[in-house]
Amino acid sequence: MDSKVIKSMLAMQRYPWEQGVCAQALYELGREDLWIPMAYDAIKRMSPDGRLAMVSGNVPVSDPAACGEVCLRAYEKTGDDLFLIGAKSMLDYLINTAPRTSDGIICHNTISFQEGFSSKQLWIDGLYMVPPFLAVMGKLDEALEQIRGYRKHLFDEDAGLFYHIVDVEGGRFVRKKHWATGNGWALMGLARVIEQAKIKERKDVESELCILLTELLNSMLKYQLPDGRFRDILDDDTSFVDGTSAEMTAATIYRGIKGGYLTSGLKKYADRAYETVSAKIDAYGLIREVAGCPDFVSEGTSAEAQAAYIMATAYKE
């Protein structure tokens, strides 16, 4: 892989979820020279209540948990209690402090960014942020309950896809769209929890989540463009073409094949996406033609696009 992709990713300003997904990508790539310092900095920027990498006020609830696994892995690698304290503090916040919906699902933020909606919102992005960390910290049953909550409130059974944002308390959607990147977050989160279920020999959890993962993946692939990418809104032919969701899909397929819970016949879909996005890397290592930060409603560049590409590379054979 072109090292410029990593360098450009590290040069980007990062919110908690970006710090987390970027560090996780480097962990999966085996670059401990990079992900361990990133875990360290996430802890140094930990808020008093235990949320990691808090550089954006008191708003994020689920996003900081994306930094959690690398803190645990850094402790396992170094034996430094600082990292274990960080991981345990993040877990304690999620279990005991984080705001939840009335049925116990951890909210995405402490506020609503949209006027007229309550703060009791679920964003499908959170399926990647929270359940995988709960699972690696030994809370697999809680991770499963969180995923079931996302399915209950955000899954479109007819389409086999997740909607983006719902106000659970208000009983209405904030963004009732099949956002490609959001569904990509869900794919990657499900894959990581499945792997923890396999490690813990919880075949009941593995089976339930493999069914959901396969349904979601197959539904997404119905919308895959000839070049392997997707429209930003999967079922909206007028929305721009996005590479982030394509790389998230590729990363999930590659790791799923390697992990034995997805079939090798899916590899062609991942290869198509990987090859196309590889051609969109510019001279600086920035991946172009992706859902762009900071608002992710127009084409641009993003840290998660860089991270998803690195993850796909880590598992590609």
Image (spheres, rainbow, N blue to C red):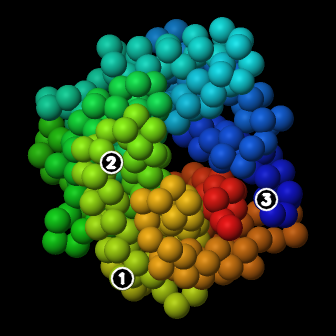
Q: Are marks 1 and 2 in contact (CB under 8 Å)?
A: no
Query: In the rendering, at what x and y percent does residue 36 appear?
Result: 74, 29
Of labels 1 and 2, earlier in sequence is 2
Which amino acid, mark 1? Lys
Mark 2, mark 3: which one is toward the viewer?
2
User: Whole-Å distance between the Cαs marked 1 and 2?
Assistant: 24 Å
Instruction: Kindly give the residue lying farthest to the bottom in the view shown.
Output: 226
Q: Which mark is residue 5?
A: 3
- Quarter that holds the C terminus: bottom right
Q: Is residue 227 above or below residue 231?
A: below
Residue at image mark 2:
206
Residue 288 shown left or right of residue 2 in the figure? left
Query: In the rendering, at what x and y percent does residue 313 appear?
Result: 69, 62
Q: Is residue 283 above or below residue 229?
A: above
Quadrant of residue 14 in the image? top right
Residue at image mark 1:
222
Q: Is residue 133 above or below residue 123?
A: above
Q: Residue at x 38, y 69 (%)?
A: 217
Q: Secondary structure at mark 1?
A: loop
Residue 205 shown left or right of residue 299 in the figure? left
Which amino acid, mark 2? Glu
Q: Secondary structure at mark 2?
A: helix
User: Whole-Å distance between the Cαs marked 2 and 3?
Assistant: 33 Å
Q: Nearer the viewer, residue 65 or 178?
A: 65
Which amino acid, mark 3? Val
Quadrant of residue 212 in the image? bottom left
Q: Nearer the viewer, residue 65 or 167?
A: 65
Q: Secondary structure at mark 3?
A: helix
Q: Residue at x 56, y 31 (%)?
A: 69
